[in-house]
Amino acid sequence: MATIEKDLSYFSLRLQELLNTSFPELSGDRTFINQRSQWAASAYEGAFRAGNPIAQCDGIADYILFEGLHFSKFDTVFKVVCNEFDTNMADEELRPFALKMLPVCDLVFEQYPLTEEFADSPEYELLYTELTGTIQIWIEDNGLQ
């Protein structure tokens, strides 16, 4: 029992770290975090008991833990803010401003298929350009607050 709780804590911490960094909109969703962590711990245990090597057990658990979390809207908005608007604000203001812009950019994201491979597609450049324009218009309308 203690081993399962330890594994669950390990998976929860790994998932929480990713969410805090790249998916802040999910970072407070305890149900999501607990469910994914439990699934990953169970998958790891099942794979281990089936005789799989540790690396393969880790891979199976990671697949479940991070499923659907490969393309980050926040990372993309943060990249745009850092690359295109960094001269407009201090470095310590970039992340909070990107967090503020995330909901502003939701309509832009809805127009694209945000799959795991999307960042390597030609459509990504179009998304980047649209996000830049959306943020620029927001700044013109609202100023840097």
Image (tube, helix red, strand yellow):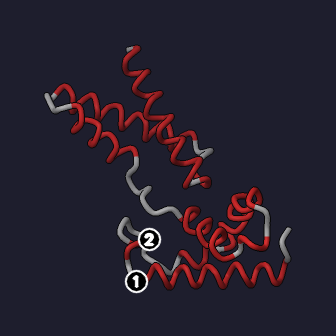
**Residue depicted at 78% across the width and 73% down the height:** 88
Q: According to the image, label 1 marks what residue? A: 122
Which secondary structure lies at badge 1? helix
Residue 5 horizontal/vertical position (percent): 43, 21
Could you tell whether 101 is left or right of 126 in the image?
A: right
Could you say whether the residue bearing mark 2 is in a helix, strand or loop?
Answer: loop
Outermost residue, left direction?
51
Is residue 28 rendered to the left or right of residue 89?
A: left
Q: Position of residue 14 (x, y in %)?
A: 47, 38
At x 83%, y 72%, the residue is 144
Q: Nearer the viewer, residue 93 or 133?
A: 93
Residue type beneath disc 2: Leu
Image height of 86 relative to 91, above or below: below
Residue, disc 2: 114
Front residue of 141 and 43: 141
Residue in view at x 41 percent, y 57 percent: 68
Which of the 4 image quarters holds residue 48? top left
| CB within 8 Å, label 1 to label 2 | no
Bin the neighbour count of mark 1 within 10 Å (Cα to Cα): few under 14, some 14-19, many 20 and up: few
Sequence-wise, the earlier of marks 1 and 2 is: 2
Q: CA distance from mark 1 to mark 2?
A: 13 Å
Q: Position of residue 86 (x, y in %)?
A: 71, 70
Dividing the picture into quadrants, the one containing residue 122 is bottom left
